[in-house]
Amino acid sequence: MKDEKVRLNVNKDRDYIICLCYVYCENYGVDLECRKALKNIKYDIEYLTHAVNLQRQAQQPERRSAFYAIMSRSFNHSEIEAVLQFDNVTLNIGNNYDRFDGVYTAPVYGTYLFSWKITAGYASSVNTALMVNSKQVASMHTDSGESPHQGFQASSSNTAIITVQLGDQVYVRNTPQRGQILSNLVEQSGFAGTLLFQP
């Protein structure tokens, strides 16, 4: 934070000095060649400032975060609103996903990709939503009654690319419906996410 303040002050001082130079040229009738030279200096300073910022960014360690988790057992109470717990974690780079509450906490401000898959059991109609804190950003309906398997099961998935802030909590919420969210060795329900890039 201290370095950032120093950099901002340098930028402000640079612009102030250039502005004074232009005023001086206007008031004292400095010739055109001098003005062109001053303009070139301004461009050089802007280029060097940009190069320094890129170098600082390159020196910062790359932040990596990704996870994938599935339900270890079926959820038999889809009529209850709840945060779904995908407790069988197979990938958790950065340790930002909590298998005990099903919540992913964003480690940095950036653009992320999240995806989730739901398998509805026999005669089940399941509504789920991707949440950021308490705000819904995407939703999905899975109904085994509409599947070609004649009501035995149905699977659907959804993906969202969103920008979240540092510390935002991302999770999948079940909204009250009927039936079962199926997850076993054959048919799994899962939740995944990864940091794509930082601004």
Image: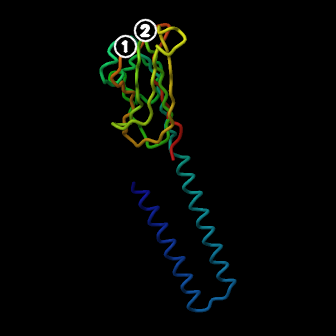
Q: Position of residue 177 (x, y in %)?
A: 35, 20
What x and y, as percent, mark residue 25?
Answer: 59, 86
- Residue at disc 1, secondary structure: loop
Residue 125 location, x and y as percent? Answer: 41, 18
Q: Mark 1 and mark 2 in contact (Cβ < 8 Å)?
A: yes
State which tag comes first along the sequence, 2 or 1: 2
Q: Is residue 148 visible?
A: yes
Quadrant housing residue 136: top left
Task: Give the CA distance from mark 2 to mark 1.
Answer: 7 Å
Q: What residue is pinned by disc 2? A: 122
In the image, is residue 117 above or below residue 151?
below
What's under tag 2, amino acid-wise?
Answer: Tyr
The amino acid pointed to by label 1 is Gly
Task: Name the residue rendered at 35%, 37% in the picture.
Answer: 133
Q: Residue 161 at what x, y percent from top left?
A: 51, 37
Which residue is painted at 38% across and 18% down in the image? Answer: 87
Task: Label 2, secondary structure: give it.
Answer: loop
Question: Looking at the image, which is closer to me, 145 or 195?
Answer: 145
Up the image or down, 114 lies above or below 88; here it is below
Q: Is residue 103 above or below residue 137?
A: above
Dot 2: few (<14), some (14–19), or many (≥20) neighbours within 10 Å? some
Q: Which residue is mark 1?
A: 179
